[in-house]
Structures are given as structure tokens and as C-alpha cells.
DNA sequence: GCTGTTATCAGCCCGGCGCTCTAGCGCCG
């Protein structure tokens, strides 16, 4: 599939056009096309060959021609031309919060700065202040933004890591000398950001496998090669470590490269107490020197008198002690989720009709969904006013009579406004099946104000859920200043549910806060907040967070049957 | 750059907030 490549190039073109100050609508056309291609379920190469690209909304003649060029040659002339005109570093600067294309252009034109390192230097030397439109605060904001960016540089969001791992594993599976292959490391533990991929392969012919790996088209640099290991840097700036072992050593090796360092250190301590030495390719019975090759991970933990510990828990956050005491959580499964309670339709900024969403959700096996479009203040998202909301409620009532096998709840994602009021009065909210409240403005208010806003929403008798409670965006935006403990305490007190937002660039609450919420008696809901049909499948990311947070089925309200869910929602109003 | 419409081009997501040349612009959701 070259969908990823086409989407990547179009999005890169859009960034470069933005820096050049091109027509905003042209830029939007490229972004829209990039999104459309990324969301395609079909192979774009197949669509090119069968001349069926024309059916895709947002792809006209010019873009179709460029897609054809990219499929045939891996790039297109226009892209190469832009790359020669716009320094790469300027595009990277777009990721710095508070810094947009115009300011980047000013900085480039006035100071000839083309890398983030140079930008950081200039900001530290106070050379940016004084440029048109840039003062002390902007300069300080840029430094802060660079600091945040550095923390996530070279790290991938889960979808990218999964995509790359799948691509690599598919290639390996087709190699005749490969017996088994799996991804270990942070990806297998479902960490929110992945710094490197660890791929474990079993084969009797490691040299052949490694030679085969060297033909992988994304390899930019080979950093290390031995008889069992290959370490490479990919063109996307990502490191991949391949470990090729004899088939008998596969599970030991997969286990060895899955747990965090802290988990592995602690596990080795326990193993030593029990007379074992855990090594990369096997486990040694110390007394006899016997080498053991467990045939699965259950057997590895079994040797240490523990039940199986799922990869998501292997962080040394108490899971080893819990395992020894037989007190591990009964981890949530994706199949436990019975409905998605935060979905946007084309009544606000979603792409699909409520009918389409309901049918797709029913096909996924869901028992219920909630349509929770934006409220009127969020103009950019075409938020619903009272009149349209009531119309939507009527429409949903009608659909519930027509579409069998799934129940659609009428909801809203009501804005918690900057002045701490909700975007709708209580007499509107009380008509809905479910109310989600969330912040979309005034992120930079101080802690006291932000906390007051959220607490006021929590104490509203009609607000069931607080969505994306900390507002963080991975690699983009820090969580806003908010007294999290006060929020959790108030939520516990009022039966207000906190969301794990499954959008892979949010994952908010994160694993640690979700675990804390559980400990404080707060119920959790796992939602996608999706704006299109495919996004319903993002629920897995939220479930993974819940697994890392030690949550069980009973902690998560959308594992309940519909009657029980309605009971839980009504408890808030009592 | 695309779409809808039928001209051979107009319209395409709006508005608040915070910053800065304090009235206008850039950034953001």
C-alpha cells in the first residue's frame, strides 16, 4: 500500500505551501486530499490502475495526476521542486506551538534561520524579539515550544509505529527462512509514544534473514550488524532493532525485549531468588546449569510462580508483586466495549450521517452509541444551537424506530466556556440522554480559573462525562494547568464519569491518571471522539490505555448493557 | 487546489484570544 506515502507527500506539500504563503484554499485542498488518501480502505495503487480515483471527494484532475506520478516513481516533480525551495527545518518549525507559517517566514527572511537549533539559539540570545509581530512573550513561547518538541523528537504516535511494524513484519513473513516474527518493546506494551521498534524473528538462517532485511526500502543507515542483530535508522528518523534467534529461543527473546527495563530488572531479581537466571535467549536453572526454552510467555512467568502478565502491565508499577500475590487485574478486552459514547456526525464537524454511523457501529457489534456533536459556540465546527439540537433529537428518535439492533442516544459535547458557563442552559441539557462537557477555548487560563470551570461542569447535575479531561495533545500541546486531584475528587463525589479519549494523539486521560481515577473511585468511559466512520476503530487505543491503567471491566461504563448504562447515567441527576 | 455550476468563475469553516507597531494580525480549535 502506497497510501501512506501519497498522504505524507501531500501533507508535506501543504506545509511547504503554507510557509511560502500560498493561497489558503490550495493548501486546504492538499490537506484534504492527504486525509482522504490516509483514510482510504482501498489500495490507492489499485485505484490508479483501475482509473477509479475520480470518485474520491477532493481529488480533481491535478491531484489525480500527481498521485499517478507518486505511485509510478515514488515522488512527483512538484514536490521535488518545492523541497528545493523551502528548507526542511522551516517545515519542522510548524510543529512548534504558537509559531505559524507567517512568523516562520519573517524569521527566515530577516535572520536567515533554517533549523530549529538555530531558532533556539536566536531565541536564547533574544534576537527574535523586535522582529515584526514578535515580542518578548512570543519569543519565550517559542523557547517553551521547542523544549516540548525536543521531548518527543524521534518518537512516533502509535498508529505510525503500528503501520511501520506491520509493513516490516509482512515483508519478513514472506521470507522463506523466517519462522515466526513479532514486535516487542514499547509498541507491544502499547506505550503512547514509541521511540524505537524492536522486532523479534525466529529462523535457522539468520544471515539470510538479515541480508533480506537490508533490502527494506526505508533503511537510511545501518548502525550495527552482528550474527543475531541488525540496528537501522529509517528514512522517517525512526530506529529499528531486529533480533534474529533460533526458533527455540523465540519466546524468551520476545519476552526479553518486551518488558520495560525496570520490569526486567525486578523480574530477574525474583528469578534469582527462585534459582533461575533470565537471559536473552533462554532461562538458566542456576543449580544444574540446565538451559530452558519456554514455548510461550505463560511458561516463563509460570516458572517464577506467577500468572501471565500482559505486556501492557510490564512497567514495574507493582505488577510483579501483584502477580506473586495473584492480584493482577482482570484486564479489559476490546470485545468488552459495548458502545461508543462520543461521536460527531455531519450535523457538526463530522463527515458521516447519523444513519451511516449507527449502521457501522451495529456492524461492529455495538449495542449502543451516543451522537455528541459540538455546541453552538464552536463555530468552526458548525456547533448546534438549541433549535438544531432539538431537531437532531427528533431525527434520532425517528432513526431509533427505523434502525434495528442498535440504540442511538441523543447527546451533546457541550462547551465549557471561558467564563465557566456551559454553552447550553440546564433546561436544554436535561432533555438529552447523555451530556459530555469539555474545554475547547481559554487553554492558557491560570490553574484556578481552569479548575473552577471544570469543577462547575462536574457539579452540574446534567453533565455525565468530562471529555479529554486534561486537554493534552501528544507531541503538540501540554495538558492545561488544572488541579487534577480536585477534578478526580469532585468526579468521584458526583458520579461524573471521566473519559479516556482514544484518539491516538490525545489518549487523555493517560494511563497513570486513569489508574489514579480508579483508585479514587471515579468511573471511566472509553470513547473515540471520532469524526468519521473508520475512526470508530480507534477504540483499541483507549482500551490499551485502560489496560496499562490496570482498569477492569467494571471500572468502564461502556462495557455495561444498555439498561445498566442508562441507570448509571441517571444516577448523576439524583 | 476542488466543486458546482454553466459564467468561464466564485466560493471554499468562523470567530475568540492573545500578542503586538493597542488596532490589527496570527494562531488555533
Image (tube, grey):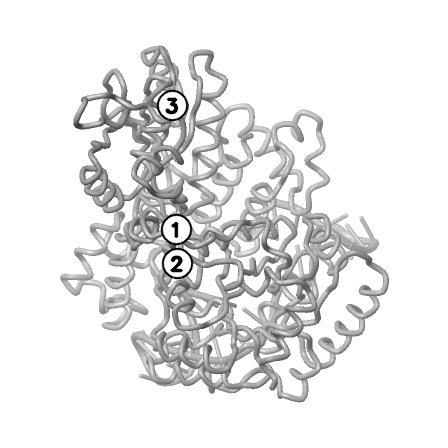
Direction from residue A420 to residue A340 in the image, left or right = right
Above or below, comparing residue A511 to residue A320 in the picture: below
Q: Chain of mark 2?
A: A
Q: Are marks 1 and 2 in contact (CB under 8 Å)?
A: yes
Above or below, comparing residue A185 to residue A352 in the picture: above
- The residue depicted at 67 percent of the width and 25 percent of the height is A49
- The residue depicted at 47 percent of the width and 87 percent of the height is A419
Instruction: Name which of mark 1 and mark 3 comes first in the sequence.
Output: 1
Q: Are marks 1 and 2 on the same chain?
A: yes
Residue B5 at x, y = what percent?
81, 55
Direction from residue A389 to residue A462 in the image, left or right = left
Instruction: Name which of mark 1 and mark 2 comes first in the sequence.
Output: 1
- Give A418 or A260, whichever is nearer the viewer: A260
Could you classify mark 1 by the number of other residues whose Cα lies within 10 Å: few (under 14), some (14-19), or many (20 or more)? many
Quadrant into which the C terminus of chain A falls: bottom right
Direction from residue A530 to residue A353 in the image, left or right = right
Amino acid at each position: 500500500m502506497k497510501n501512506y506515502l501519497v498522504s505524507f507527500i501531500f501533507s508535506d506539500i501543504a506545509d511547504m505551501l503554507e510557509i511560502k504563503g500560498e493561497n489558503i484554499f490550495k493548501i486546504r485542498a492538499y490537506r484534504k486530499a492527504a486525509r482522504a488518501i490516509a483514510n482510504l480502505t482501498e489500495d490507492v495503487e489499485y485505484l490508479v490502475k483501475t482509473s477509479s480515483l475520480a470518485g474520491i471527494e477532493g481529488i480533481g484532475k491535478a491531484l489525480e495526476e500527481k498521485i499517478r506520478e507518486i505511485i509510478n516513481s515514488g515522488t512527483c516533480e512538484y514536490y521535488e521542486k518545492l523541497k528545493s525551495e523551502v528548507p526542511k527545518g522551516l517545515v519542522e518549525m510548524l510543529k512548534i506551538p504558537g509559531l505559524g507559517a507567517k512568523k516562520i517566514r519573517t524569521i527566515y527572511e530577516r535572520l536567515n534561520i533554517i533549523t530549529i537549533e538555530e531558532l533556539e539559539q536566536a531565541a536564547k540570545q533574544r534576537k527574535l524579539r523586535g522582529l515584526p509581530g514578535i515580542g518578548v512573550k512570543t519569543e519565550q513561547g517559542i523557547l517553551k515550544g521547542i523544549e516540548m518538541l525536543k521531548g518527543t523528537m524521534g518518537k512516533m504516535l502509535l498508529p505510525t509505529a503500528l503501520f511501520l511494524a506491520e509493513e516490516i513484519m509482512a515483508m519478513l513473513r514472506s521470507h522463506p527462512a523466517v519462522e515466526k516474527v513479532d514486535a516487542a518493546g514499547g509498541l507491544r506494551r502499547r506505550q503512547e509514544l514509541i521511540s524505537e521498534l524492536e522486532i523479534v524473528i525466529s529462523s535457522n538462517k539468520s544471515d539470510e534473514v538479515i541480508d533480506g532485511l537490508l533490502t527494506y526500502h526505508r533503511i537510511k543507515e545501518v548502525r550495527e550488524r552482528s550474527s543475531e542483530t541488525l540496528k537501522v535508522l529509517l528514512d522517517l528518523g525512526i530506529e529499528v532493532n531486529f533480533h534474529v534467534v533460533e526458533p527455540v529461543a523465540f519466546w524468551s527473546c520476545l519476552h526479553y525485549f518486551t518488558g520495560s527495563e525496570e520490569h526486567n530488572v525486578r523480574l530477574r531479581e525474583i528469578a534469582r531468588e527462585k534459582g533461575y537466571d533470565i537471559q536473552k535467549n533462554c532461562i538458566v536453572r542456576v543449580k544444574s546449569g540446565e538451559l530452558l526454552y519456554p514455548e510461550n510467555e505463560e511458561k516463563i512467568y509460570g516458572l517464577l510462580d506467577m500468572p501471565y502478565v500482559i505486556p501492557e502491565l510490564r512497567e514495574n508499577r507493582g505488577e510483579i508483586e501483584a502477580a506473586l500475590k495473584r492480584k493482577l487485574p482482570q484486564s479489559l478486552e476490546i470485545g468488552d466495549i459495548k458502545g461508543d459514547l462520543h461521536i460527531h456526525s455531519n450535523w457538526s464537524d463530522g463527515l458521516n450521517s447519523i444513519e451511516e454511523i449507527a449502521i457501522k457501529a451495529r456492524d461492529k457489534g455495538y449495542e449502543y452509541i451516543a451522537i455528541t456533536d459540538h455546541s453552538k459556540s464552536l463555530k468552526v465546527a458548525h456547533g448546534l444551537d438549541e433549535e438544531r439540537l432539538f431537531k437532531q433529537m427528533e431525527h434520532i428518535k425517528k432513526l431509533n424506530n427505523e434502525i434495528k439492533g442498535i440504540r442511538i442516544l441523543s447527546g451533546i459535547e457541550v462547551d465549557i466556556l471561558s467564563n465557566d458557563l456551559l454553552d447550553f442552559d440546564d433546561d436544554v441539557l436535561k432533555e438529552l440522554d447523555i451530556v459530555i462537557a469539555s474545554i475547547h477555548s481559554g487553554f492558557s487560563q491560570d490553574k484556578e480559573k481552569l479548575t473552577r470551570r471544570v469543577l462547575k461542569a462536574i457539579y452540574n447535575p446534567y453533565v455525565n462525562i468530562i471529555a479529554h479531561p486534561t486537554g493534552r495533545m501528544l507531541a503538540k500541546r501540554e495538558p492545561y494547568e488544572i488541579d487534577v486531584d480536585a477534578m478526580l475528587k469532585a468526579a468521584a463525589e458526583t458520579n461524573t464519569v471521566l473519559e479516556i479519549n482514544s484518539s491516538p494523539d490525545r489518549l487523555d486521560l493517560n494511563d497513570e491518571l486513569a489508574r489514579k481515577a480508579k483508585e479514587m473511585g471515579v468511573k471511566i468511559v472509553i470513547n473515540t471522539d471520532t469524526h468519521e466512520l473508520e475512526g470508530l476503530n480507534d477504540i483499541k487505543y483507549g482500551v490499551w490505555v485502560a489496560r496499562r491503567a490496570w482498569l477492569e471491566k467494571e471500572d468502564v461504563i461502556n462495557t455495561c448493557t444498555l439498561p445498566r448504562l442508562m441507570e448509571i447515567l441517571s444516577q448523576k441527576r439524583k
